Amino acid sequence: MSKLKVASILFLFSTFVLKFSSMIRDLVIAGLFGDSYQADAYLAAMTIPNAFVLFLLTGMKDAFLPSYYKFNAIGRGEEHLTNVVKGTFWITLGVSILGVLLSGPIIRLFYPNFGEFEHGFAIATATAALYFASLCMVGVNAVYEGYFDAKKKFSFSVFSQTSVVLMTILFAILFHEQLGIIAIPVGYFVGTIVSLLLKVIYRTPRKFLNWQQKMDIGEVSDFYHIFWPVGLTIAVGQINLMVNTFFAADLGEGVVSNLNYAFRLVNIPQAIFGVTIATIAFPIIAEAHNKKNPALFKRGLEKGYLYLLVFLTPMLAGMWYLMHELVGTVYERGAFSASATSLTTSYAVLYIGSAFFYSIQAVTAKGFYTLEKGHYMMRIGLFSIILNILSNWIFSQFYGAQGIALSASIVALLYCAITFSTLYKEVGGFDVRYLLRNTAQIVLGVTVMMAYLYGFDVMVPGSEDWHRIIRLVVLGISGAIVYFSVMLLFRNEFVKEMLAKGGTPSSR
């Protein structure tokens, strides 16, 4: 089995662990605080600094990987790493200080309704300040996670992110009675320190950084000239989520929380398959581009799209059919009531399109970043933000909170269509027949699976009244078997590769 395949399997497993721990974090928040104003204040406030967090975390990795390859090819990889780490530290330190000082005015500007609740402003301000204070550690962590991805050590990069989530969960459970919901951002702050310490221990303090190397300001400037459009593009999704939260905060208590719970749940397949497959494909297409092999570059993108669709499409379709059972099983306990389950379910089914189209866009983005044309993505991303503001305003007027979730899927569709068509022209087109043939197999497999799920409920009296967990297990497993059986019947190459023990992706 190749080293890349082993690394890919470990990365997929560690990503499952990360998303499982993230789900537990959301489950803990829902169980302790439900859809109360405290949860609204925390979730709304953290979306603002979290845009900076994603700007650094994902954007840094996407920009640093091709940059590191370029410098490493001339024997300056470690030197470049040191320059970017030092530059990032000073930049994020300045943003952290500024963000902490401005947290209060920012919250009062964007969430004036929090003043209607006791301690509403205090909760939101403290949350924003703690997340902004974490940015300095987040920035340095992001550079090293990009470095580990460049070395194809995907699993360690994800493991360090998981440590942040686990620390957040630990603080929420241990200190919620003493600190209230503020225990969560405190745990996040501590978690970013722990994650950084893990990297220091892994590399050893001496090898962690060339402490005596003088920072090359010109090199750092050149890197950030490439990074900032990439980072801004990556942050588009979070910025749009922040815009959604601004509108949701005006619709009453619990709306922000339930929309967030719905989005987080539906986002799990996107994070597992969309981000994972895009991340694994990135080094492959980056090396193909570096070797000036356009055929291999396009093949890597095509296979990235199809691997994504093979796994993501049936999972999202199954979630749509079983969403009420899924929401109830995950969240309905403690402070999270049955009425909250119904509301969250109604939002979650409308977020399905968002998860699907942003997953496709994640693969498309890797193509642009490899070509060092992230500015295209940035322009389209800025357009999507404007479109999202208008769409939220219109749909929230007519459909309330459900309109916000619907708006997210519509904007994602347009964003995905524009970015894909732009990349298609930029690379001189893909193998359309190859893409359509495999996509048709996937659509047919999903259609048969959905017909089976519907037929099961018709043919088995009372199955809709089964316990939620039993329904999820029985229909989930049997539905997956039906889907993959259809795919094998058509000899789908991607399912065959997955099932081939120790096999490697075939060429065509």
Image: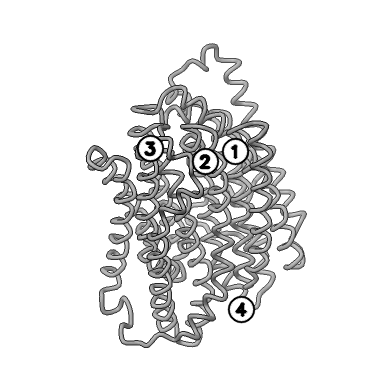
Instruction: Please report whichever mark, 3 or 1, sits nearer to the chain's N-terminal start.
Output: 3
Q: In the figure, is residue 247 to the left or right of 30?
A: right
Cα separation, mark 1 vs mark 2, equals 8 Å
Instruction: Please report whichever mark, 3 or 2, sits nearer to the chain's N-terminal start.
Output: 3
User: CB atoms at circles 1 and 2 under 8 Å apart?
Assistant: yes
Residue placed under numbered mark 3 in the picture: 38
Q: Circle 4 — which element?
A: loop
Identify residue type, mark 2: Phe
Q: Is residue 273 above or below residue 1?
A: above
User: CB atoms at circles 4 and 3 under 8 Å apart?
Assistant: no
Exactly how many numbered labels are in the figure? 4
The spot of residue 320 in percent (x, y) is 58, 32
Q: Circle 1 — which element?
A: helix
Q: What is the image's colouring?
A: one colour
Which residue sits at x=29%, y=43%?
Answer: 172
Which residue sits at x=37%, y=55%?
Answer: 129
